């Protein structure tokens, strides 16, 4: 096992009550590597774990590797690559435990950002720059989290100025760990913690865990947000999932069980007649944003949102609970291929409006001291027309013949009129 050393061997058959994910997962692990902490392995590049290195069956093949990038704006950025034999993805502990990009059946999962030299080290992203839009200087991920104190446009809130989408995506993680479950199907997991705290402000911790099974087309993301402070604290979180080709193309469509759809701006209202479909790349396209209230099933409000390509033989599916993430935003940004031909699927606790507007409409999660809020999402990649049709029918059943209420213009309580 390159770079893992005897310490990994000493942890073989250790119980699962270690590390940041202990409160959620209590299985028996064949391998548990803390990449930082008391017995740090974090700064040893080239850690590689494979079935053969830990005595597991070689089929399906999988691997977990770590490396630190060098050169340019990515210098010092740490990556953890998980390949489960069908689906691969790269986690960036240095950038708030975001997901940089993935691959499924030979297809890229993510988008082509104008930020082509990323992932950019957070030290080189001035969140206060560009009039509060400095966040965009590092934006190139498949999954970028927005929050935890703020996740909308730049704005003033009391004495503090908040930049676009908050700080969590540009805070490096700690207590990063890699886990391999001894029991079949030998779950592969990466976990870590990100703290967003300051004097005279909230003290919030995000405990995140990515998990997949060898050979699976699914990845599960579980986040627990904890108030470490002595006073109640508001929490907002928005999951900015970003996709380009081959899932996004001319004629692609978002399929969701919607109760209500509202354009966020007058510009979005121009396209309300085809809010759920996409055109070809259009240089200079001005973004359009649509705010949804989704239909969920059961006491937790389980729902699914799918982006399917025009041919209907590839799709990206998100599953989550509306009780945990009650708001959904669709971001359409079909600019030229070198400008950022991309769409965002964005489950959240709130809508990405000015903080004062969201506070007025009671969409913050209020955490008492020591309290937590959990959000769990899973993504599925589909690679056949039959699989796409099955999920489309599932969402149709969830819609149950109800016609969505589609507003022609921005309106409260969804967006400032």
Image: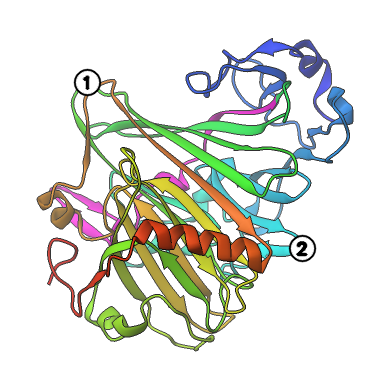
Mark-to-mark CA distance, 2 and 1: 49 Å
Q: Which residue is mark 2?
A: 106
Other residues around mark 2 within 10 Å, as few (<14) / some (14–19) / many (≥20): few
Residue at 18%, 73% in the rendered image: 410
Residue 242 falls inside the magenta stretch: no
The numbered mark at residue 248 is none
Specify start and end residues of the magenta stretch as a single range: 152-180
Quadrant of the snapshot with the N terminus? top right
Give the x, y percent position of residue 397: 41, 58
In the image, 218 versus 203, the foreground residue is 218
Q: Is residue 114 above or below residue 318?
A: below
The numbered mark at residue 230 is 1
Disc 1 element:
loop
- Is residue 185 something that shows in the picture? yes
Q: Is residue 254 above or below residue 395?
A: below
In the rendered structure, the answer to whether residue 302 lies left or right of residue 56 reads left
Other residues around mark 1 within 10 Å, as few (<14) / some (14–19) / many (≥20): few
Contact, CB < 8 Å: mark 2 with mark 1? no
In the image, 359 versus 195, the foreground residue is 359
Give the x, y percent position of residue 47: 78, 33
Quadrant of the snapshot with the C terminus? bottom left
């Amino acid at each position: 096992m390159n770079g893992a050393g005897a310490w990994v061997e000493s942890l073989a058959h250790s119980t699962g009550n270690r590390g940041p994910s202990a409160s959620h997962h209590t299985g028996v692990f064949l391998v548990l590597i803390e990449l930082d902490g008391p017995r740090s392995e974090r700064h040893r590049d080239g850690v590689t774990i494979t079935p053969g290195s830990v005595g597991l069956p070689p089929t399906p093949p999988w691997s977990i590797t770590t490396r630190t990038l060098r050169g340019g704006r990515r210098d010092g950025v740490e990556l953890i690559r998980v390949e489960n034999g069908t689906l691969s993805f790269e986690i960036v502990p240095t950038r708030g435990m975001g997901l940089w990009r993935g691959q499924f059946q030979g297809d890229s999962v993510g988008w082509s950002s104008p930020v082509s030299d990323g992932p950019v080290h957070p030290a080189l992203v001035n969140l206060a720059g560009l009039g509060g839009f400095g966040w965009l200087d590092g934006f190139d991920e498949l999954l970028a989290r927005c929050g935890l104190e703020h996740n909308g446009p730049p704005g003033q809130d009391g004495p503090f100025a908040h930049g676009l989408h908050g700080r969590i995506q540009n805070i490096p993680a700690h207590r990063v760990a890699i886990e391999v479950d001894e029991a079949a199907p030998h779950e592969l997991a990466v976990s870590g913690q990100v703290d967003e705290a300051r004097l005279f402000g909230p003290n919030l911790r995000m405990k995140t865990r990515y998990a997949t099974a060898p050979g699976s087309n699914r990845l599960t993301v579980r986040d627990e947000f904890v108030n470490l402070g002595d006073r109640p604290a508001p929490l907002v979180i928005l999951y900015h999932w970003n996709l380009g080709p081959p899932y996004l193309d001319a004629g692609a469509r978002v399929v969701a069980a919607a109760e209500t759809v509202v354009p966020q701006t007058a510009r979005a209202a121009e396209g309300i007649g085809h809010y759920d479909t996409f055109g070809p790349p259009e240089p200079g396209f001005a973004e359009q944003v649509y705010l949804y209230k989704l239909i969920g099933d059961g006491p937790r409000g389980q729902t699914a949102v799918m982006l399917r390509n025009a041919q209907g033989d590839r799709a990206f599916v998100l599953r989550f609970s509306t009780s945990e993430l009650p708001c959904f935003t669709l971001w359409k940004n079909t600019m030229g291929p070198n400008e950022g031909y991309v769409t965002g699927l964005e489950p959240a606790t709130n809508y990405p409006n000015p903080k004062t507007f969201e506070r007025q409409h009671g969409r913050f999660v209020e955490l008492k001291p020591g309290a937590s809020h959990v959000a769990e999402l899973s993504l599925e990649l589909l690679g056949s027309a039959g699989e796409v049709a099955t999920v489309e029918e599932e969402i149709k059943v969830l819609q149950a013949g109800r016609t969505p209420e589609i507003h022609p213009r921005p309106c409260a309580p969804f967006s400032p009129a």
